[in-house]
Image: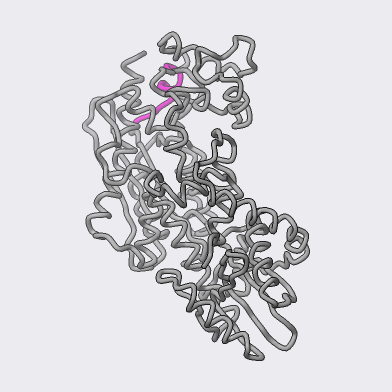
């Protein structure tokens, strides 16, 4: 029987309270997001592909239907062989259990490989591996070396995936051995936490999001008012918790001599005074530079750890959708154009480019919200498809950022709560417009949903979901139309 697993060990190291709640009060967990599911799915996919580095192995345990007794027995039996490759080989010691992604035994020794979908080795990966080493070593097996396998983000795919180029293998054996004494201590400590009758009393802190966002934040943070010092824009987390530790939580409690910058004090004072800031000359100048026909453009992208298309990199943001609203003049009626890629596995980028160039050809100014994103994606397209580069650069030259009046605080109202995201600005200026009624409400969900669709792992109604994606992206550009109209009305 086991008390701790690899995942609960990492959870407990992050926070004893989270470990206890996860064991005895799972009903208090935050509802899982689609983004979290997608990250888990992507990690599983990367792990499966990495097995091809060590082919013809035996799958010891099934994560979806885990039976630890069978997994331990099967691992023990296969270890009797002179040579073997195991996927999810399972080890138990001191009431702690873990499965290693790839375990290789040959004439030279025993080798462990943990596969990560990250593009770098993080400290928590080494801690994770150190626990596995602890279990395997104390099961009577000498480990010759221990590797992390992770993604090479410099790799550019050609016709077929080259897994030897896609993955990097790096030994972390020395670091893992260094941690063995602390692993033993932590195991004893975490087991004692789970033997207590009462939940540990631990205040919220930096550990709530480091190294992973905790899924009990909703429960532990339920008494934090809105707004609070945690809502001050661009204030470091360390400073927020510094204030919190002194019982300075609400804006009214912040000392007048506290070191906030001008924008942060502006946010605090606007909230306390319920005051709206409008700098009409600056807004007027911004509006006067817009030329008709005027476009309002927004992109959606998805990222894959394992690139699906020729001439693409791991985690490259691949454009798959856009919405474009168009006004020929201030008095003309609004037109709308859009694009969404097929989900048959074909590269969407050339189709995207061709329709975008056609739809944007007559526009003088093209408004986007947060210009760095659209400009970055267009620059990548120009680089990856040089035959279209001149026309793409021409679009870049016509872009203008509608975020500027809000980022520069030419317009600020307390309802924006320190943010200048379009999803906050829109209802702050026009309360009747919001994203609440949409099936897909944010770009992260849109990205992850489409990623699942193109990989063939999506389990929902694809036709209905495509419609939801179009509605979401359309509202992003309609929001820009409405926000610009409100600015014009204000000045």
Which of the 4 quarters of the picture holds residue 56? bottom right
Image: magenta residue range:
283-292
Give above or below for 49 relative to 454. below
Q: Is residue 259 shown to the viewer in this render?
A: yes
Residue 358 pos. (x, y %): 34, 50
Residue 488 pos. (x, y %): 34, 19
Q: Is residue 405 shown to the viewer in this render?
A: no
Residue 273 pos. (x, y %): 44, 8
Q: Nearer the viewer, residue 459 or 338?
A: 459
- Residue at the spot 44% in from the left edge and 18% down from the top edge: 412
Residue 26 pos. (x, y %): 40, 49
Is residue 45 magenta-colored?
no
Give above or below for 30 relative to 155. above
Which of the 4 quarters of the picture holds residue 167? bottom right
Is residue 288 magenta-colored?
yes
Q: Is residue 103 left or right of residue 59?
A: right
Give above or below for 177 relative to 449. below
Q: How is the image coloured?
A: one colour
- Residue at the spot 31% in from the left edge and 46% down from the top edge: 440
- Residue at the spot 63% in from the left edge and 25% down from the top edge: 242
Q: Is residue 458 left or right of residue 410?
A: left
Which of the 4 quarters of the picture holds residue 127? bottom right
Q: Is residue 415 left or right of residue 315?
A: left
The quadrant of the picture occupied by the C terminus is top left
Q: Nearer the viewer, residue 387 or 119?
A: 119
The mark tally for this picture is: 0
Q: Nearer the viewer, residue 129 or 268?
A: 129
Q: Main secondary structure of the magenta part?
A: helix
Give above or below for 194 relative to 133. above
């Amino acid at each position: 029987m086991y008390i701790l697993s690899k995942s609960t060990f990492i959870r407990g190291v992050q926070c004893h309270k989270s470990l206890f709640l996860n064991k005895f009060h799972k009903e208090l967990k935050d509802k899982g997001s689609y983004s979290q599911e997608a990250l888990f799915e992507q990690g599983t996919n990367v792990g499966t592909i990495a097995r091809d580095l060590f082919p013809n192995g035996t799958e010891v345990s099934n994560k979806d239907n885990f039976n630890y007794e069978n997994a331990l027995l099967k691992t023990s039996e296969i270890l009797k062989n002179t040579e073997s490759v195991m996927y999810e080989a399972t080890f138990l010691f001191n009431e702690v259990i873990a499965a290693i992604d790839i375990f290789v035994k040959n004439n030279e020794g025993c080798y462990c490989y943990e596969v990560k979908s990250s593009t770098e080795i993080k400290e928590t990966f080494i801690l994770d591996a150190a626990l596995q080493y602890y279990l395997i070593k104390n099961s009577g097996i000498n480990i010759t070396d221990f590797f992390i396998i992770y993604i090479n983000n410099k790799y550019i795919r050609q016709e077929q995936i080259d897994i030897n180029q896609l993955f990097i293998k790096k030994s972390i054996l020395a670091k893992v051995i260094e941690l063995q004494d602390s692993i033993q201590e932590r195991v004893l400590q975490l087991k004692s936490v789970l033997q207590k009758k009462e939940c540990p009393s631990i205040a919220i802190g930096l550990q709530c999001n480091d190294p992973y966002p905790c899924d009990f934040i909703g429960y532990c943070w339920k008494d934090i008012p809105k707004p609070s010092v945690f809502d001050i824009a661009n204030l470091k987390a360390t400073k927020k918790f510094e204030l919190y530790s002194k019982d300075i939580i609400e804006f009214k409690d912040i000392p007048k001599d506290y070191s906030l910058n001008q924008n942060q004090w502006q946010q605090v004072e606007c909230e306390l005074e319920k005051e709206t800031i409008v700098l009409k000359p600056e807004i007027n100048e911004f509006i006067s530079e817009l030329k008709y026909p005027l476009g309002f453009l927004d992109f959606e992208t998805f990222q894959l750890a394992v690139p699906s298309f020729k001439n693409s990199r791991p985690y490259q943001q691949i454009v798959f959708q856009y919405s474009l609203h168009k006004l020929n003049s201030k008095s003309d009626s609004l037109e709308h154009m859009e694009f969404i890629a097929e989900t048959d596995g074909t590269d969407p980028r050339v189709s995207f480019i061709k329709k975008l160039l056609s739809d944007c050809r007559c526009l003088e100014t093209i408004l986007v919200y947060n210009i760095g994103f659209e400009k970055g994606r267009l620059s990548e397209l120009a680089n990856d498809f040089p035959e279209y580069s001149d026309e793409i650069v021409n679009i870049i030259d016509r872009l203008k950022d509608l975020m500027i009046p809000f980022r520069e605080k030419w317009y600020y109202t307390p309802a924006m709560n320190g943010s200048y995201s379009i999803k906050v600005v829109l209802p702050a200026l026009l309360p009747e417009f919001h994203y609440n009624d949409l099936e897909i409400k944010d770009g992260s969900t849109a990205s992850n949903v489409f990623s699942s669709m193109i990989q063939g792992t999506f389990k929902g109604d694809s036709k209905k979901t495509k419609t939801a994606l179009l509605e979401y992206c359309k509202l992003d550009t309609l929001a820009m139309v409405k926000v610009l109209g409100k600015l014009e009305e204000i000045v």
